[in-house]
Image (spheres, rainbow, N blue to C red):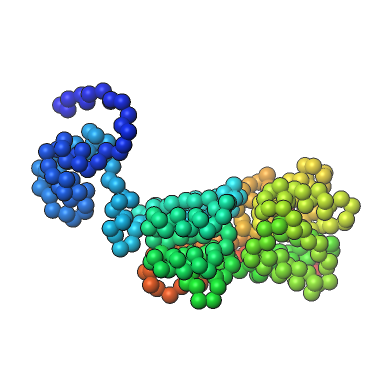
Amino acid sequence: MTPPRPPLGPPRSRFVSAADVARLAGVSRSAVSRAFTPGAQVSEQARARILEAAEELGYRVNRLARTLHQERSDLVGVVGGNFSNPYISAQLDALSKALHARRLQCLLMNGAGGVSEDLKRLLDYRVRTVVLLSGAAPDALIRLCAQNGARMVLINRPRPPKGARADLILADSARGGRLAAERLARAGCHNVAVVISGSRTSAKIDRAEAFCSEMALRGIPVTRWVDGPNSYETGAEAARVLLQGTGIDGIFGVTDEIALGVLNTARFELGLRVPEDLSVIGFDDAPISGWSSHALTTVSQSLEDLTRATMEAIALPAEAAPMLYEVPVRLVERGSARAPLSP
């Protein structure tokens, strides 16, 4: 029978070290290291004493220190912003789960205050890959990653400067904009708007420009809203202004977050019927958009495809050529857009 453990003492002022374990187990410091290294040689008797001492002391291996001695670390840096965005939070959830399944560690940094310093700090931790979810990476920082053997993965970010080495994962934003335009036109909308926000990233601009071009071919006027951040509140404010006596009967929000702001404000604040009075289409297919209370028709960029492509880029050797992967998009029909008119 295992004797009861003594009561816990006061909290330590430092982490338990391998030397602490070695002293308690009566072995050398190197024996402790070997006991926690797969495949390393250590007697079963010594290993048992070491594991028992480690359990008693609460010892954890310093994996950050081990990383410094490896050719490639198991750390993946993820830089993003606006984590409250429904699609970005779902994207981060899917990516972190995929990293965990590959026994890779996610080091998350909020880039709301500026991407440059966060990227430099990630390299201080010897990350193997930097995944950029928001912002634009300057050419110098892309080169800095390459010089330190770290790949950079840009997801729906601007293409890097010519000669800069970065993996690029892009949804087909232009096709998504055209799909949204075609769907509103088939619903019989004759006076539409696109809500871009003031962030004006390359992906959002591509969606909006393709939408406007397709509408122009059909002779349908488009009002643009380009104010505010990429947020629910921007969609709400756009709805308050755009839907006051203008006759607008269709709105494309270039993200689901914006479109949901339009949708709920039209319904619950302005008293409009969706889709009878107003058709609304978003872009992303965030999980929240499929809730029955929203039923947002949207252009989907598959989280599964995006995550798979990101993991493929992370797995590439540091010296491999940059990867370009285009995530296909499709229209997901729900209840926020009027049914297409009969031909």
Query: Could you tell whether 152 is left or right of 289 in the image?
Result: left
Residue 261 position within the rendered picture, expressed as x and y whole percent measured from the top left: 71, 48
* Residue 314 at least partly seen: no
The quadrant of the picture occupied by the C terminus is bottom right
Looking at the image, residue 220 lies above or below residue 73: below
Name the image quarter holding residue 300. Answer: bottom right
Query: Could you tell whether 258 is left or right of 79 in the image?
Result: right
Closer to the camera in the image, 106 or 210: 106
Closer to the camera in the image, 130 or 247: 130
Residue occupying the point 74% across, 55% down: 227
Residue occupying the point 43% across, 75% down: 321
Residue 216 position within the rendered picture, expressed as x and y whole percent measured from the top left: 80, 72
* Residue 159 at least partly seen: yes
What count of labels does the image hold? 0
Closer to the camera in the image, 283 or 293: 283
Residue 243 position within the rendered picture, expressed as x and y whole percent measured from the top left: 83, 52
Query: Could you tell whether 93 is left or right of 316 in the image?
Result: right
- Taking the view exactly as shown, the residue that stands out farthest to the bottom is 163
Query: Could you tell whether 72 is left or right of 330 in the image?
Result: left
Residue occupying the point 57% across, 51% down: 113
Residue 135 position within the rendered picture, expressed as x and y whole percent measured from the top left: 58, 59
Name the image quarter holding residue 196. Answer: bottom right
The quadrant of the picture occupied by the N terminus is top left
Residue occupying the point 18% across, 55% down: 39
